[in-house]
Amino acid sequence: MGKREDLRNVAIIAHVDHGKTTLVDQLLRQSGIFRANEAVAERVMDSGDLERERGITILSKNTAVKYGGTKINIVDTPGHADFGGEVERVLMMVDGVLLLVDAFEGCMPQTRFVLKKALGLGKKPLVVLNKIDRPGARPAEVVDEVLDLFIELGASEDQLDFPVAYCSAREGCASLDPSVPGTDMKPLFEMILNQVPAPEGDLGGPTQVLFSNIDYDEYVGRIGIGRVERGEIKVGQQVAICGGGEEGHRNAKISKLYQFEGLKRVEAESAKLGDIIAVSGITDLNIGETACTTDHIDPLPFVKIDEPTVSMLF
Ligand code: GDP
């Protein structure tokens, strides 16, 4: 067994417009990944044309930042209720969840929707109150609203004991004490490192990677996005693809493997327990399937997720 103290995997969940994109921008700016003179593109996580057109986040994208010696993978979640199943799949890849709430607007329908999913999956969200710089922001009241929502959604005692960061993503500052203004994002980085569990498991065991999402790339085709749940995976490795609610398995080869760095997907030779990766070369890969060592085929349980429609939710 082992623990990856050098890694944290988190997702940010929020109602649309509460500041997810701005927050990730700031974490990137203030992390070790970008050099000081390197500009971060505007609205980095919303760069898809379709998203811009519709004004909502459709595809989940991953970003990784570095704080001290620790890599923090930030998995974006779709904010819109139409993509309910995807929220769960994304949440299954992470050990920690940041619930981002506008300190002026308070809890909104999508706050409730994504929080319900996170609590249901047993996640222990960290609460981030954003936009505390807004005139009329009411952080204390909104924390109470958030607490009420946790209670209403049946949070466990452990989940109810959430830490709170007070933040202005726009100004790039966070504080754990609402009466003391923050000067940078350090308190939020520290909260993530201290409160989100480091991935833990069998570092030396046979390969097991659970794919939670599928993406497409115009050059390499179908890409599986998943998390290494056991052991290590390497470029060129022969694997058995199994699970996903089906019997049997088929063999495949990992032709390319990527990890996330800043906003980029970069090629890597290998990845290990806890890493969130993208792989290409498995042309018929499906969501929910597991890649295993060929002589140790043990698929992870397939979690069937219903895709609810908006009308079913509200
Ligand atoms: P997303 O939909 O959650 O990704 O939200 P965005 O990051 O796109 O932010 C929505 C709007 O809120 C934008 O106009 C941001 O500039 C603004 N915004 C984000 N963070 C802050 C903040 O800390 N303070 C203020 N005043 N505005 C913010």
Image (cartoon, grey):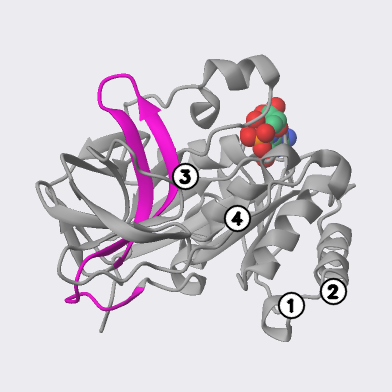
Element at badge 2?
A: helix
Q: CA distance from mark 4 to mark 1?
A: 20 Å
From the viewer's perspective, is the residue at label 1 or at label 3 nearer?
Answer: 1
Q: Is residue 107 magenta?
A: no
Residue at the spot 54% in from the left edge and 15% down from the top edge: 49
Residue 88 got which mark?
4
Residue 53 position in % (x across, y down): 65, 14
Nearer the observer: mark 2 or 4; the answer is 4
Question: According to the image, label 3 marks what residue?
Answer: 27
Q: CA distance from mark 2 to mark 4?
A: 20 Å
In the drawing, what numbered circle is on residue 233? none
Label 3 with label 2: CB-CB less than 8 Å: no
Which numbered dot is residue 160? 1
- How far apart marks 4 and 3 lie (CA) works out to 24 Å
Q: Report crowding for label 3: few under 14, some 14 to 19, many 20 or more residues within 10 A (C-alpha).
A: many
Q: Is residue 216 magenta?
A: yes
Nearest to the observer: residue 213 or residue 6: 213
Residue at which label 2 appears: 151
Q: Are marks 1 and 3 in contact (CB under 8 Å)?
A: no
Secondary structure at numbered mark 4:
helix
Q: Quadrant of ligand 1?
A: top right
Where does residue 119 sit, x and y in percent of width and height? 69, 68
Q: Amino acid at mark 2?
A: Ile
User: Magenta span covers which residues?
Assistant: 200-229
> Magenta stretch: dominant SS?
strand
Foreground residue, 81 or 214? 214
